[in-house]
Image (cartoon, helix red, strand yellow):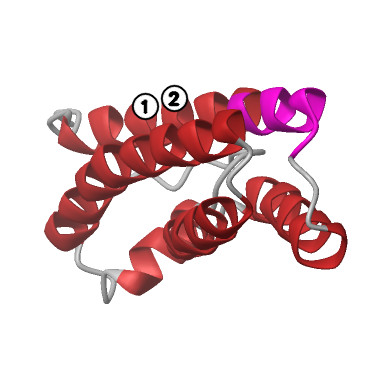
Amino acid sequence: MPLRTSDHFSPQTLLGHAYQDPDVCAELCGLFLLVAGEQLGRLGSAVAAGNVLATSHECHALKGSLLIAGAHAAVRMLEQIELEFNRKKLPCPRHEFQALQAEMEATMQDVGRFLADSKEPAAQT
C-alpha cells in the first residue's frame, strides 16, 4: 500500500488503525469516505439551524472519524468550532464552517486518491 504524504491526512495513521493490513486499510478508507461525508452533512444542517446541542454532538462524532484518518488540520478546526459552541453557545460563523468544508473536501479527495492508488496492481518488474 503506497504511503504517500498528504497535508490533509496520515496514511500511516490509517494503516496503523488497520493493524498494518492493506485490505483492512482499504476497507477503513472506504468507510471513512462514506461516514465522514454523512457526518459533515449532518454537521452542516446543525450549523445552519443554529442548533448548539446538535452541532456539538456532530463535531464530536466527526472528530472521531477524522482522528482515525490522522486528519489533524480538520480536527483542530472542529475543536475550535466545538470550543466556541461550548463556551459561548453561539452558532458557528459561516466562514469557519466554509473553511472546515474546504479542508474536509481536500481530506476526502486525498483519502480517495490513496484508496485508488492502493487498488492499482503492483508494477511488473
Local packing at callout 2 (Cα closer than 10 Å; few below 14, some 14-19, many 20+) is: some
Would residue 107 be seen by someone viewing this image from the given angle? no
Label 2 and label 1: CA atoms lie apart by: 6 Å
Tell me the SS state at disc 2.
helix
- Please say whether residue 70 is one of the residues in the magenta stretch: no
Q: Which residue is mark 1?
A: 113
Please tell me whether mark 2 or mark 1 is closer to you in this view: 2
- Please say whether residue 97 is one of the residues in the magenta stretch: yes
Q: Which residue is mark 2?
A: 109
State the quadrant of the C terminus. Answer: top left
In the image, the segment drawn in magenta is: 92-101
**Residue drawn at x 28%, y 71% as measured from the top left:** 20
Q: Do the numbered discs 2 and 1 sit on residues whose CB atoms are within 8 Å?
A: yes
Q: In screen coordinates, is 121 left or right of 10? A: left
Residue 80 versus residue 35 in the image, above or below: below
**Residue drawn at x 65%, y 46% as measured from the top left:** 74
- Counting from the top left corner in percent of width and height, residue 92 is at 74, 39
Q: Mark 2 belongs to which amino acid?
A: Gln
Tell me the SS state at disc 1.
helix
- Counting from the top left corner in percent of width and height, residue 28 is at 24, 55
Q: Give the quadrant of residue 23.
A: bottom left
